[in-house]
Image (spheres, rainbow, N blue to C red):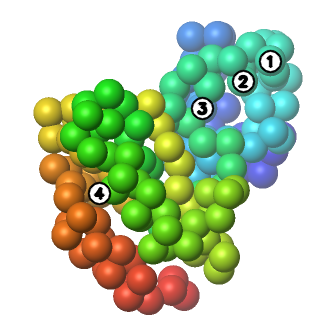
């Protein structure tokens, strides 16, 4: 079994399709993302085709398939954020953090992921930095977030 998921799979003794989403959530909570190896192991254990697992997992924007950086920013691209000027704020954010086309900074410390909605439309525009939501954003608030990110010491 893939490293570190054996104990997760044992939490679901029925090993039925109904357990898929909780299993995916547990794997991501522990590993930060869901790897191809994880999907392969779920396929073998639950006897569900990998394409079906991937199809279900990609339906929900909570699941990640790449290892996020130390600082992971989720940018809302929903209608409310767009109407409230989010697009120009997001471009400013990407530019000032020097985010590359692959969604990562040159040093690999920061990753950005655009998501269809963060579920905080009344507080638009919104981003999520790791587990913290930043709402009702404007240029000044974005600049403050960027300063705090740039001044954050690297993890040991």
Badges 2 and 4: C-beta atoms under 8 Å apart? no
Q: Name the residue under label 2.
A: 54
What is the quadrant of the C terminus in the image? bottom right
Mark 3 element type: helix
- Depth check, front residue: 59 or 45: 59
Sequence-first disc among 4 and 3:
3
Give the CA separation, mark 2 to mark 4: 27 Å
Mark 4 in CB contact with mark 1 (< 8 angstroms): no
Foreground: 156 or 5? 156
x, y percentage for residue 75?
41, 47
Residue of label 3:
24
**Along the polypeptide, which appears first: circle 2 or circle 3?**
3
Can you give x and y, in whole percent of width and height, for residue 131 in the image? 35, 55
The crowding category of the residue bearing disc 3, from other C-alpha atoms within 10 Å (few below 14, some 14 to 19, many at least 20), is: many
Residue 143 shows in the view? yes
Q: Quadrant of residue 138?
A: bottom left
Q: How crowded is mark 1: few (under 14 residues within 10 Å), some or many (20 or more)?
A: few
- Mark number, residue 132: 4
Cα distance between the residues tagged 4 and 3: 22 Å
Residue beneath disc 1? 51
Q: How far apart are marks 2 and 3 (CA)?
A: 10 Å
**At numbered mark 1, what does the secondary structure look like: helix, strand or loop?**
helix
89 sits left or right of 106 in the view = left
**Is 44 rendered above or below residue 153?**
above
Question: Which label sits on residue 95?
Answer: none
């Amino acid at each position: 079994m893939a490293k570190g998921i054996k104990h997760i799979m044992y939490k679901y003794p029925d090993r039925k399709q109904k357990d898929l989403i909780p299993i995916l959530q547990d794997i991501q909570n522990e590993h930060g993302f869901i790897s191809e190896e994880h999907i392969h192991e779920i396929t073998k254990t639950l006897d569900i085709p990998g394409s079906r697992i991937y199809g279900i997992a990609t339906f929900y924007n909570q699941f990640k398939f790449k290892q996020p950086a130390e600082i992971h920013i989720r940018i809302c691209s929903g209608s409310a954020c767009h109407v409230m000027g989010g697009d120009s704020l997001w471009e400013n954010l990407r530019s000032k953090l020097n985010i590359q086309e692959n969604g990562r900074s040159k040093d690999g410390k920061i990753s950005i992921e655009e998501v269809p909605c963060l579920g905080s439309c009344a507080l638009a525009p919104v981003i999520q930095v790791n587990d913290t939501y930043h709402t009702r954003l404007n240029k000044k608030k974005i600049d403050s977030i960027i300063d705090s990110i740039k001044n954050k010491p690297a993890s040991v």
